[in-house]
Amino acid sequence: MEKPMNELESGGNAEHNLSRRSFLTRGSLAAAGLALAGLAGCSNGQQTQQEAPVADAAPEGDAAAPAINGNLPAAWDVEADVVVVGLGAAGLSAAIAAKLDGVDNVLALEAAPEKDCGGTTRVSGDMLMIPDDVEGAITYQTELNGPYTVEPELMRAWAQGVVGNYDWLTEELDFVLGDATAARPEFPGIAGGESIKTYYVDGICGMSSLWIPLKDLADELDVQISYDSRAMELIYNYETKEVYGVKTEDGRTFKARQGVVLACGGFSGNEEMLQDYMASMGCPKPFALGSPYNRGDGVRMAQQIGAELWHMNSYAASSNTIRAVSPDSRVCNIPYPTGIDYIFVNGEGERFMYEEMRGIQRHGKQKDKGVWPLITIPAGSHMILGGQSGSVDLLGAITYMTWPVIMGGGLSTNQELIDAGIMFKAGTIEELAEKLGYPPEKLASTLAKYNDAIDAGEPDEFGRGTDVYASNMFNAAAGTDAIAGDEHGTESLAIPAFERQKVEGPFYGIEIALGLLNTQGGAKRDGKSQVLDLAGNPIPRLFSAGEFGSIYAYMYNGGGNISEAVSTGRIAGQGAAALQPWDAA
């Protein structure tokens, strides 16, 4: 396994690359274990004002006045050396890396309560995409990015980082990685794809198999965690932009002597941001498969300090999903009908797609006319099921990932969905239409058209009943197939036809929407995971990691988000650890 070197790994802190075992053996926990309660000073008013840089001193005689050239508080509520925002794979990796590099007091701020902590990592498939060759990874991902180019130096840093995950996880953290069977690579035939490998911790898919050992290790290393602490504002020097700490939604201030790492995920839980950035995708109200606590806080903080944003309209998604908690909640699950007597209809009551396309979709994208747009599930769409499919529970096939499965609270049977007002059942299609809000004659006409075509042996308007060719064998930049063969690419890649069957009563109906796994946009960062300003310069003491500002602009291989979260978190934590405190005498 090639172990890449980056600028952070080639020098700096003398404590760098301590292994988990040696760190614990040295008894460093006793020295590092500053209890969070001992750092707080807001409840009793006994904490004294911290000495700030001269340019930011408060006016004499008014200790409570705001800083002249910044927004430093009169007194900090909590102090730490490194503050990490977020507790997913990116945040935990950053916190662990900082501790292993000798930082005494690392504090993680988690927006969720303790029972719901962990971000989207905790409810993901936990797959790690770790290439075995830097050059191959660069070639492959450059091809997947297609026309959405990323600077060569950033692409190389990404490749070095994800390749380096193998040694860091297995040698320094003592994790056991087992080969995954999926996405090795996800796009076979693409140049560089032979270097793509995927892994699960202990060989377990999902079930928080990566998140749990990362969290356990952070606890062993005495990383302090403040739950119910949503970071909303950076504390910094208005002239130099040097970051001094973070302010949370409840007004508490957290001092970061060495650096702040924004690992707070994306904005899949923020409906306003989804409206702003997903309008062109035709799906402004997707359901969320990941953490509902990901509300774009990092985007706001990045805009506040003048950071450059990128990849704000890049997303990873599943295909059709259904609500899994209540008629008002966007928390969702993936339905798996056991029959084939169902169709999808849009908000106007008309069919709009080949209903079963999971075999050729790639994280919610589907090739069309040489490009891979996010598939469109129009607002107000429904799955209409006949008696065979509707009589068997839609949920329950996926038991190892998604928020309602891992975190609990989700509905699982069709009867529970009906009782909750999420799913509806009727004896006639006209009755079902009224329950779903469609004109009865329109939905009845759509269903009759579908059933009559089957009786007449006529071809389906969306190709249902015919083989589908795996057009994922593609050259993104050129918009052509990458493997020669017949007119479809190759006969061996045909996916068997999704057959047609008449949809007959009793009828069931349930709303469907695109299932958003995560967003990729956020603050742009350099190869050292430093956040960049609009001029391309690093903002002092501010780092980012994970899906908040991901390298992925278009397509990516399965496991790529989790692996990038680990690598950028590791690099960010090491970078913050290498800095001298800003308040050093």
Image: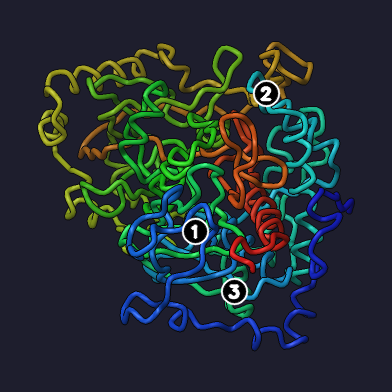
Would you name the residue on which mark 1 appears? 245
Would you name the residue on which mark 3 appears? 105
Q: Which of 280 and 155 is in front in this view?
A: 155
**Residue at mark 3 to residue at mark 1: CA–CA distance:** 14 Å
State the quadrant of the C terminus. Answer: bottom right
| Residue in the picture at 56% in, 40% down | 549
Asked which secondary structure carries label 1, the reply is: strand
Image: 62 above or below 3: below
Residue type for callout 1: Gly
Q: Badge 1: how crowded within 10 Å, few (<14), some, or many (20+)?
A: many
**Residue at mark 2 to residue at mark 3: CA–CA distance:** 39 Å
| Residue in the picture at 63% in, 81% down | 32
Residue type for callout 3: Asn
| Residue in the picture at 76% in, 72% down | 174
Query: Who comes first in sequence, dot 2 or dot 3?
Result: 3
Whether residue 78 is visible: yes
